[in-house]
Image (tube, rainbow, N blue to C red):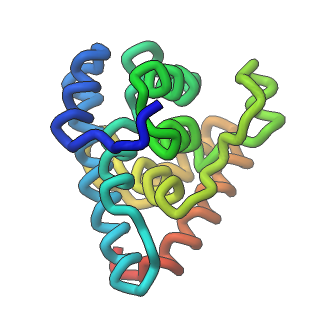
Amino acid sequence: MSEELPSRDQALELLRENGCSAKVIEHCEAVAKLAMEIAEACRERGLRVDLQLVEVGALLHDIGRSKTHTVHHAVAGAEIAEASGLPEPVVSIIKRHVGGGITESEAEKFGWPKDVYVPVTLEEKIVSYADKLIENSRRAPIEVAIDKLVKERKSDAAERVRRLHAEIVELAGESL
């Protein structure tokens, strides 16, 4: 596995090479744009955040949608990222971005390999949060993502997204 992050263009090429649709790529670009705004806001408030990692991680977060459009795209994407030789921090962003994080018991029910599927680093949290604010390729209020999870009877995930929202607003400021 390489320690070097791919460029923006290389990340976009990786999405295309793996068969991601134009719609998925458009979504990833919108998430990356918003994630960069959040990362910049965090940096302006004195937080250390790897901007290149946020951008590349956000661009590649849905690479697993080339294989499935279910929640399992997180694991499929991590496998693609590992096979492509991407650095571990990018693999972790991909694996940990869904639903504000997937708990150990949820991962077990899904039959996923034993691992951590909840965002841990600031970069992972920023990408996961930005993804919740982008509906297709447009920005939407966080309540849209939360309401959708509640309607799908995923109240634990809705609560994780609420907590992630509160944490990011605290870190980045209300202006987002």
Q: Nearer the viewer, residue 13 or 109?
A: 13
Q: Residue at x 16, y 37 (%)?
A: 9
Q: Farthest residue toward the left?
A: 9
Horizontal side of 105 relative to 107 (left or right) equals right
Residue for point 28% across, 14% down: 19
Give how far across and how far down residue 84 sits, in percent. Answer: 39, 22
Q: How many marks?
A: 0
Q: Is residue 85 left or right of residue 161?
A: left
Viewer-proximal residue, 12 or 176?
12
Q: What residue is shown at x 20% (from left), y 27% (from top)?
A: 13
Q: Is residue 172 above or below residue 160?
A: below
Percent coordinates x, y for residue 139 in the rendering:
29, 54
Residue 50 at x, y = what percent? 39, 62
Q: Is 79 located above or below residue 51 in the figure? A: above
Where is residue 175, by image quadrant? Answer: bottom left
Relative to residue 78, is residue 148 depicted above or below? below
Which image quadrant for residue 140? bottom left
Point 43% across, 77% down: residue: 172
